[in-house]
Image (tube, rainbow, N blue to C red):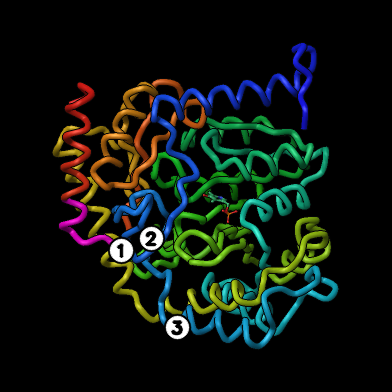
Amino acid sequence: MPLPQDGNNPIAWRIQQMNERVKQNKAQDLYFYLQPAEAVNGAHVTINGRDMLQFASYAYLDLLGHPKIQAAAQQALDEFGSGTHGVRILAGTTRIHVELEETIAQFKKAEAAIAFSSGYGTNLGVISALLGRNDIVFSDKLNHASIVDGCLLSRSKFVRFNHNDMNDLGRKLAKAPAKTGKLVVVDAVFSMDGDVINLPEVVRLCKQHEALLMVDEAHSVGVLGETGHGIMEHFGLDDGIDIHMGTLSKAIPAIGGYVAGDAELITYLKHTVRAFIFSAALPPPAAAAAKTSFEVIEAEPERIKILQRNVDYFISGLRKRGFNTMNSETPIVPIIVGDDERALLMAKFSQERDIFVLPVLSPAVPQGTSRLRANVTAGHTLDEIEYAMNVFEQAGKEVGLL
Ligand SMILES: *Cc1c(COP(=O)(O)O)cnc(C)c1O
């Protein structure tokens, strides 16, 4: 596509600016994105012919390649092929999709569930299907981009409250006029900081102000709670969440998203969410892999124990070395660096020593909190975590952070 060179077209200008930035980073050998994996084996990944330790993936329970999940995907491929040639409400529903939804409902102790072909699309579609112009949505300031986009798409009044600040949420809920539709949306585990929402207080406020509550458990299912059932188990709650949203792409080695909840809610969503009605169904192998993953999580709770042991070891080890890991208590561990340049240099230093870790810079995170975002999983051994922490420590000293 030839671009006009006169600088009068802001769209063309935007494209050129981004290309300039990418070119500059590549020239300085500080471009880390889109590196193709040549092989993946547990916590090991081969990149550029080098065996590296993976600290950037969401393989929290090390389920990729699990024999039962692998076999389920293969059998679905043999039985139904690689796709469905259809959207769910028309030609796209197979027996496997129905079984997946039943399994999710059971896992989340809900009446019913609906599965979508993308987690991002789930938030976009569900939030915008629930809300109308006269409703109000209350969203934590650090909520995932897909939640923010869903709120914007809904065209309802969009109220953001300070991160995990229950006084602020309470104040804002109290200001909303009576008889307005109110929805509170929060991440269970925040995807950049790794901290956990104060769910008991959110539930209390929602009840007090008659607001519906939607919780995104992308980084919570398989991670939080003794047996990995998520944030309600973590806090020992039996109810309070109306819309249990989650993905099939983080702890679960597939793709897609879901909502679990009351049967009437799910019926409503099946007939209104545009991402469900106008987008093709999950491929049967992915649906089968996801279904079996929930069963494996139930059958092998020791994976969650190992994950939780590794999280404790990693976070306490980093803190002992003098790093600021914010309020993380999950496998998502921010190693705060401060400025972009040092974060980039620490990522380069770490990758040169075979640790695949990536920098997160502003504006993805607030200015001054640029970081390495390191994800630990059940697939890492304690020795591997120790090695990585030593590399991060050397990198921190190298750039003058420690
Ligand atoms: C990753 C993520 C999503 C989107 O899920 P995909 O399956 O990757 O589309 C939604 N919400 C949160 C909090 C996430 O981290």
Q: Residue at x 49, y 74 (%)?
A: 294
Where disc 2 sits, the SS reads: loop
Other-residue count near label 3 (Cα within 10 Å), few / some / many at <14 / 14–19 / ≥20 = some
Quarter of the figure that contains the N terminus: top right
**Secondary structure beneath label 3:** helix
Q: Badge 1 is on which residue?
A: 378
What distance separates the C-alpha of mark 2 from that of mark 1?
A: 6 Å
Residue 112 in the figure: left or right of residue 273: left
The residue singled out by tag 2 in the image is: 60
In the rendered image, the vertical position of residue 221 relative to residue 167, given as above or below: below
Q: Give the number of the mark in front: 2 or 3.
A: 3
Tell whether 327 sits left or right of 317: right
For residue 121, which numbered disc appears in the image?
Answer: none
Viewer-side residue, 135 vs 279: 279
Determine which residue is flagged by label 3: 68
Which stretch did the figure color magenta?
A: 378-386
Per the image, label 1 sits on a secondary structure element best described as: loop
Give how far across and how far down residue 203 sits, in percent: 53, 50
Q: Is residue 270 left or right of residue 54?
A: right
